[in-house]
Amino acid sequence: MADIFDVVADATRRDILAVLLERETTAPESNGEISVSEIVASLGLSQPTVSKHLKVLREAGLVSVREEGQHRYYRLDRGPLETLEDWLIPFVSSDAAADAATLAGAEAFDSEDLRAEQLAFASRLGKAFAETAHQVSAVVSPNKRK
């Protein structure tokens, strides 16, 4: 199976995922399902091209298919996208962006200073995670507070 990053790196596959997401949000009565011919019409691509990309998306677990006679109906499956989300979160959080900006100027530091900066960032991240976990457990289990 292809790496999820390789799968979504292709613009055509991202376009197909966008069509599936649009169907899910604009036509809830369809259960998010859309036929291959509708995807072809929406993107203006050939049916063999769309089918080839849908196969890659299906093998990666990003779409599921329901067969009905000669027709295939696809819908989005968000599960594998959690891998992408987990990888992206540190890059899109405000603290990480500030730390990334700090690290962007790291050329002025030698490698030892850079490692110290990375350790400091990891420490801040760990502390923030521990504090958040503590707050969540206090809310979820208020009787277990010390």
Image (cartoon, helix red, strand yellow):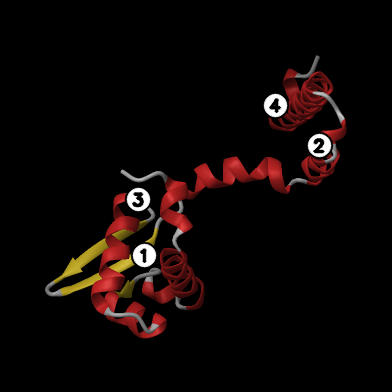
Who's the residue at 83% across and 44% down the image? 101
The residue at which mark 2 appears reads as: 103
Task: Give the CA distance from mark 1 to mark 2.
Answer: 40 Å
Q: Height in image: 65 above or below 109? A: below
Give percent across and percent down for residue 120.
Answer: 82, 23
Q: Secondary structure under badge 4?
A: loop
Residue 130, horizontal then vertical, whole percent: 75, 24
Q: CA distance from mark 4 to mark 2?
A: 39 Å
**Amino acid type for the residue under numbered disc 4:** Ser
Q: Residue 26: image x %, image y %?
A: 50, 78
The reply to whether residue 80 is visible in this rendering is no
Q: Nearer the viewer, mark 4 or mark 1?
A: 1
Residue placed under numbered mark 1 in the picture: 75
Q: Earlier in the sequence, mark 2 or mark 3?
A: 3
Q: Which mark is residue 141?
A: 4
Q: Compute the Cα span from label 2 to label 3.
A: 35 Å
Q: Which residue is mark 3?
A: 61
Along the line of sight, the residue nearer the viewer: 12 or 71: 12
Residues marked 2 and 3 touching at CB (< 8 Å): no
Q: Quadrant of the C terminus?
A: top right
Residue 134, image quadrant: top right
Percent across and percent down for residue 112 are 80, 18
Quarter placement of the N terminus: top left
Closest to the camera, between mark 4 and mark 2, is 2
For the residues labelled 3 and 1, the Cα–Cα distance comes to 11 Å
